[in-house]
Image (cartoon, rainbow, N blue to C red):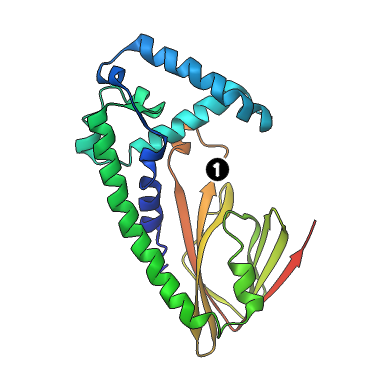
Amino acid sequence: MKYFTQQWYYDCQKSDIYFDLEVSDEAKDYDEIYFQKLYQERLKEYSKFAFALNMNIEEYADMRYSWSLLKLNYLPINIINLIVDIRVAALGYVTQDVFEKITEFCKNIETQTNKTTDMYEDYYKNIKNIIPERILYPLSRQHDAEINKIGFVKKDFIIKTEQYDGKYLFTFKNAKVQKNIVKMGYLTWVYEEIYLKDDGYQVHILFHNHNPSLSLEKKRKIILSDVIIFAKDIHIENVYE
């Protein structure tokens, strides 16, 4: 990836940490009673989401809590050290001083990541009228698509995706591939970049790996893979189901 690198993606995860935070004076102390009170309140809030996902409430709450802890651990150590009880922060409450510092940090990160996005969009404007719509349109619709199949079939590189509007079959003709993909668990398509080459196309794809067999602790870590595909042409089929 030239623009949407793994580091860029990790930085993006930091930019919205302050979104779910509120100011609480009670967060200034380590208070077990306050933590338990907040956790029970969150369980009530999460019940409707857990029901919609046909999931146990406690399991869903643990997942949300673990994700919040992961996000907070992206903060610089000097800010983390200001948080008295990281458990309370993971439930969405921090002191005014901590909230201001996290907000400032996040907005600075957001400015940096947006610059990268803007640079790619500027580049994209120059090629969107050159590369066929039959290629650009499906590529642009794969964000968060599940990967059902990926790998070589003879000389072609195949990627099968599935999402809300159907299943796509990408066939990269007479392809060459750089970088190894982490294939354990489930892959989702995160971002892509496409470049014109004299003899065809170069496509970069960033994947997110989800491994259901990992422990809850290890699931807190985001595993990314990216590939660079060189192809003479790209054939794309869309099957609606």
**24 and 9: which is toward the camera:** 24
Tell me: residue 184, above or below residue 201: above
Residue at the image position 43 percent from the left and 17 percent from the top: 38
The x, y position of residue 167, in whole percent, is 72, 60
The x, y position of residue 18, in whole percent, is 36, 39
The x, y position of residue 218, in whole percent, is 45, 36
Q: Amino acid at mark 1?
A: Asn
The x, y position of residue 144, in whole percent, is 58, 53
Count the marks: how many? 1
**93 and 181: which is toward the camera:** 93
Q: Which residue is mark 1?
A: 211
Residue at the image position 27 percent from the left and 26 percent from the top: 95
Give the crowd class for mark 1: few <14, some 14-19, many >=20 residues within 10 Å. Answer: some
**Quadrant position of the C terminus in the picture:** bottom right
Residue at the image position 46 percent from the left and 66 percent from the top: 179
To which quarter of the image does residue 83 belong?
Answer: top left
Q: Residue furthest top?
A: 33
Answer yes or no: is residue 155 visible. no
